[in-house]
C-alpha cells in the first residue's frame, strides 16, 4: 500500500492551482504500449499524472479548473465493465472512484469529448503537457477552437502553457512519505546487490546474476524495476548502457551492476562494481579506490545552497586528478580539463534527480537559466565512474578493460545530506567480505 493518502494529493493540487490565476489544467494518464501484436508492456502510470491524483488506471484524465471564484478537480475514468473485468481485471469505475479519491467530480471517460467544451467555455488559459499528442489533448484543442468560433461565448482560450514544468518543480522537493517509499525501494535493491556479490562466480552468465536480483525484487513484492538492469562483466562495463547481459563472467574480471527496483512507483538507482572471483587485483583496487574517493568527496560536499553545476564541475576536477594520479592522463590538470581530456575516461554526469522517475525530469536550472541550488528534500544520485577500454593502447596494460562506477542515492537535508543507500557495501574490504560470505 502506498503511504500517500488523499490529503497529499489534494495539497499537491492546491499548490499547483495556487501558481496560476485562472485556467484549466488537463493531465492524461499514460497510454498502454504494445510489445508485439496484441500483447502489451506492463502498464506504468504517467508520473506527473500520478503525482497529482494517485490514480493508476489507464484511459483516465485529471482536469483541474480554476476561476477567480472557485476551483474544482475532475477525474475521468473507465466505467466498471464486466467484460473487461473478465479478460483484463477489474476497473474501479465512476462511483467507487468518487468514493476513493478526493476529487470533486468523477465522470465516465467516454463522456469527455462531450463535456470538455463546457469545461473550457469562458476560460482564457489552458495548461497541458505541450508535447502530449494524445487524442484527449487534441480534443481539448479542437473544442477550444470551436468555442472561439461560437457566437455568444465571451472569453476564449488565448494561451496554452506547459503544465509539466510547474508539476516537476513541485516534484523536486520530496515529502517524508516519498522519502519512505524511496527508502523501501533502496532496501530491496540493497538485498539484491548483496545477493549478487554473494553468489557471483566465474563461469556464470551476466543474466544469471540479473535473475537472482530480479528474484529478490519480485519475491519481496515490488511491481517493477526502475530501469533495464545493466550487468556488465569485464570490458562490457565500458559500454555505458550495456543491457544485453548475455556474456560469461570471467576470472579476474570485475562486474559492474547498475540495477534497482521501484516501490509504489518510486525509484531507486544503485551501481556497484565488484570482482567476479571476490578479490580485487591491485590495478582494479587502485582504480576502484580512486572512484570511491571521488564519490565520497562529492557526497560530503552536498548541502542546501550548493549549486548542482558546481558539483558537476568539482567532480570533473576530482576525476581528472584521479586519472592523473593513476598515470592514465598526463599533463597540467587545468589544461587537461580545458581540453576535456578526462571525458574520454569519465564521460557522463555526476548524477541526476531521482523520484517517481529514475531520471526525475525536474528542472536543473531556474527560469533565468541559472543552476539550481540544493534544498532540503531533493534527491540526487552520485555516480562517478572511470572507464578504460580493453583496446586502449595509450593506457598501461594492467588498467585495460577496467570499468568502474559507484552510485548512491543522496537526500539533501536541512544540515547537509543523508546517503539513503549507505547500507550497501562499497569499500574494498566490505565488498571482498560480502563476496566471501
Ligand atoms: Mn543513475
Image: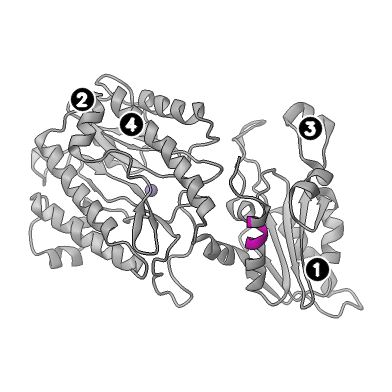
Residue for point 77% across, 59% down:
139
Q: Are marks 2 and 4 in contact (CB under 8 Å)?
A: no
* Residue neighbourhood size for the residue with mark 4, other residues' Cα within 10 Å, grouped as few (<14), some (14–19), many (≥20): some
Q: Residue beneath label 3, please?
A: 84
Q: Categorize mark 1 by other alpha carbons within 10 Å: few (<14), some (14-19), many (20+).
A: many
Q: Nearer the viewer, residue 423 or 283?
A: 423
The residue that mark 1 highlights is 120
What residue range appears in magenta? 8-12
Mark 3 Cα-neighbour bin, 10 Å: few <14, some 14–19, many ≥20: few
Residue drawn at (82%, 38%) of the image: 80
Q: Which residue is mark 4?
A: 194
Residue 253 spot, x, y in % from top left: 20, 30
Secondary structure of the residue carrying numbered label 2: loop
The residue where tag 2 is placed is 277
Task: State the CA–CA distance, disc 3 to disc 2.
Answer: 51 Å
Quarter-of-image position of residue 353: bottom left
Disc number lying in front (3 or 4): 4
| Numbered disc 1: secondary structure | helix
Question: Residue 242: x percent and y percent?
Answer: 36, 38
Amino acid at each position: 500500500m502506498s503511504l500517500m493518502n488523499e490529503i497529499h494529493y489534494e495539497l499537491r493540487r492546491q499548490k499547483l492551482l495556487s501558481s496560476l490565476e485562472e485556467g484549466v489544467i488537463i493531465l492524461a494518464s499514460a497510454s498502454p504500449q504494445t510489445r508485439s501484436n496484441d500483447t502489451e508492456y506492463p502498464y506504468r502510470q504517467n508520473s506527473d499524472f500520478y503525482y497529482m491524483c494517485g490514480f493508476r488506471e489507464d484511459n483516465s484524465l485529471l482536469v483541474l479548473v480554476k476561476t477567480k471564484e472557485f476551483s474544482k478537480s475532475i477525474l475521468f475514468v473507465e466505467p466498471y465493465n464486466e467484460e473487461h473485468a473478465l479478460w483484463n481485471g477489474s476497473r474501479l469505475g465512476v462511483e467507487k472512484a468518487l468514493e476513493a479519491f478526493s476529487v470533486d467530480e468523477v465522470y465516465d471517460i467516454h463522456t469527455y469529448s462531450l463535456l470538455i467544451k463546457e469545461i473550457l467555455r469562458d476560460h482564457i488559459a489552458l495548461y497541458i503537457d505541450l508535447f502530449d499528442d494524445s487524442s484527449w489533448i487534441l480534443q481539448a484543442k479542437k473544442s477550444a477552437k470551436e468555442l472561439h468560433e461560437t457566437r455568444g461565448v465571451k472569453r476564449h482560450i488565448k494561451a496554452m502553457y506547459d503544465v509539466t514544468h510547474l508539476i516537476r518543480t513541485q516534484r523536486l522537493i520530496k515529502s517524508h512519505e516519498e522519502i519512505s517509499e524511496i527508502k523501501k525501494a533502496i532496501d530491496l535493491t540493497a538485498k539484491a546487490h548483496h545477493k549478487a556479490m554473494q553468489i557471483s562466480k566465474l563461469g556464470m552468465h551476466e543474466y544469471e546474476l540479473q535473475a537472482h536480483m530480479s528474484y529478490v525484487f519480485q519475491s519481496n513484492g515490488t511491481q517493477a524495476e526502475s530501469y533495464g538492469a545493466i550487468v556488465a562483466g569485464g570490458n562490457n562495463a565500458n559500454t555505458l548502457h550495456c543491457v544485453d547481459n548475455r556474456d560469461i563472467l570471467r576470472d579476474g574480471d570485475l562486474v559492474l551492476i547498475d540495477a534497482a527496483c521501484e516501490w509504489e512507483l518510486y525509484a531507486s538507482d544503485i551501481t556497484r562494481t565488484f570482482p567476479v572471483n571476490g578479490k580485487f587485483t591491485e590495478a582494479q583496487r587502485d582504480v576502484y579506490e580512486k572512484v570511491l574517493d571521488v564519490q565520497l568527496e562529492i557526497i560530503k560536499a552536498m548541502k542546501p545552497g550548493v549549486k548542482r553545476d558546481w558539483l558537476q564541475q568539482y567532480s570533473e576536477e576530482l576525476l581528472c586528478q584521479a586519472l592523473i594520479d593513476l598515470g592514465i592522463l598526463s599533463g597540467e590538470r587545468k589544461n587537461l580539463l580545458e581540453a576535456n581530456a578526462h571525458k574520454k575516461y569519465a564521460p557522463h554526469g555526476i548524477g541526476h534527480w531521482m523520484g517517481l522517475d529514475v531520471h526525475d525530469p525536474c528542472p536543473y536550472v531556474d527560469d533565468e537559466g541559472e543552476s539550481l541550488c540544493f534544498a532540503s528534500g531533493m534527491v540526487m544520485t552520485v555516480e562517478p565512474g572511470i572507464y578504460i577500454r580493453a583496446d586502449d593502447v595509450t593506457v598501461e596494460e594492467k588498467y585495460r578493460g577496467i570499468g568502474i562506477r559507484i552510485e548512491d542515492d543522496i537526500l539533501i537535508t536541512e544540515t547537509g545530506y543523508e546517503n539513503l543507500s549507505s547500507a550497501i557495501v562499497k569499500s574494498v574490504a566490505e565488498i571482498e567480505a560480502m563476496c566471501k560470505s
